[in-house]
Amino acid sequence: MEAPATFLLLPQAPSSSLNLEP
């Protein structure tokens, strides 16, 4: 369960930052 949780957090974190920049 920890594996999928980390995968979702990793893509979400960088995705938010990139969306906020533009």
Image (cartoon, helix red, strand yellow):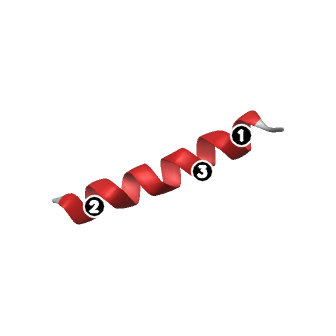
Q: Name which residue type carries label 1.
A: Asn
Give the mark, 1 or 3, whose residue is nearer the N terminus.
Answer: 3
Q: What residue is at 51 percent from the left and 55 percent from the top?
A: 11
Q: CA distance from mark 1 to mark 3?
A: 9 Å
Q: Is residue 22 left or right of residue 15?
A: right
Asked if 2 appears above or below 14 in the picture, the reply is: below
Residue of label 1: 19
Q: Quadrant of residue 21?
A: top right
Q: What residue is at 25 percent from the left and 65 percent from the top?
A: 3
What element does badge 2 sit on? helix
The circle on residue 4 is 2
Residue 6 x %, y %: 33, 57
Give the mark, 2 or 3, whose residue is nearer the N terminus.
Answer: 2
Q: What residue is at 71 percent from the left and 46 percent from the top?
A: 18
Instruction: Answer few, some or many: residues within 10 Å of disc 1's Cα (few below 14, many 20 plus, some between 14 and 19).
Output: few
Residue 20 x %, y %: 73, 34
Q: Name which residue type carries label 2.
A: Pro
The circle on residue 14 is 3
Q: Is residue 12 left or right of residue 21?
A: left
Asked if 3 appears above or below 13 in the picture, the reply is: below
Residue 16 x %, y %: 61, 40
Q: CA distance from mark 2 to mark 1?
A: 23 Å
What element does badge 3 sit on? helix
Q: CA distance from mark 2 to mark 3?
A: 16 Å
Instruction: Answer few, some or many: residues within 10 Å of disc 3's Cα (few below 14, many 20 plus, some between 14 and 19).
Output: few
Asked if 11 appears above or below 20 in the picture, the reply is: below
